Amino acid sequence: MLVAFSVAPSTAADESGSVSAAVADAIAIVRASGVPHRTDSMFTTLEGEWEECMDVVKRCCDAVGEHGGRVSLVLKADIRPGHTGELKGKLDRLEKAVAARDEA
């Protein structure tokens, strides 16, 4: 499965309104987990089994919770049993489709 998630404290962590310190704590957990992942400016996407992905998400929420009394979590999952390598595979298929469209 692929799990795209975004987690942040409900209140800003510093005077500029940035939550980057809290998010950095979550990303450290993701990176240490060993679960294949990709992070962009809005979400982190994990690829793995249900239990391992949800464990990482929970630990990230717990870490962000240390920065304030309330945590915001946005989560989207693509549950597709029997498929692996989709973190890259979905993008490869998209690029192929775009190239075919551009050639037409």
Image (cartoon, helix red, strand yellow):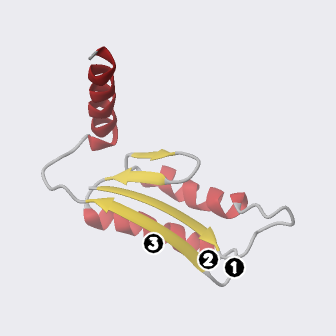
Judged from the image, the secondary structure of the residue bearing numbered disc 3 is helix
Q: Quadrant of residue 63?
A: bottom right
Tell me whether the residue at label 3 lies in contact with that at label 2, contact meaning CB atoms closer than 8 angstroms.
Answer: no
Q: Which residue is mark 1?
A: 68
Q: Which residue is mark 3?
A: 58
In the foreground, 74 or 23: 74
Judged from the image, the secondary structure of the residue bearing numbered disc 1 is loop
Residue 21 percent across, percent down from the top left: 71, 60
Q: Amino acid at mark 2?
A: Gly
Q: Residue furthest top?
A: 103
Q: Amino acid at mark 1?
A: Gly
Disc sitting over residue 65 in the figure: 2
CA gap, disc 1 and disc 2: 5 Å
Q: Is residue 68 left or right of residue 104?
A: right
Label 3 crowding class (10 Å Cα cut-off): few <14, some 14-19, many 20+?
Answer: some
In the foreground, 75 or 55: 75
Residue 91 percent across, percent down from the top left: 34, 35
Q: Earlier in the sequence, mark 3 or mark 1?
A: 3
Residue 61 percent across, percent down from the top left: 53, 72
Q: Amino acid at mark 3?
A: Lys
CA gap, disc 3 and disc 1: 16 Å
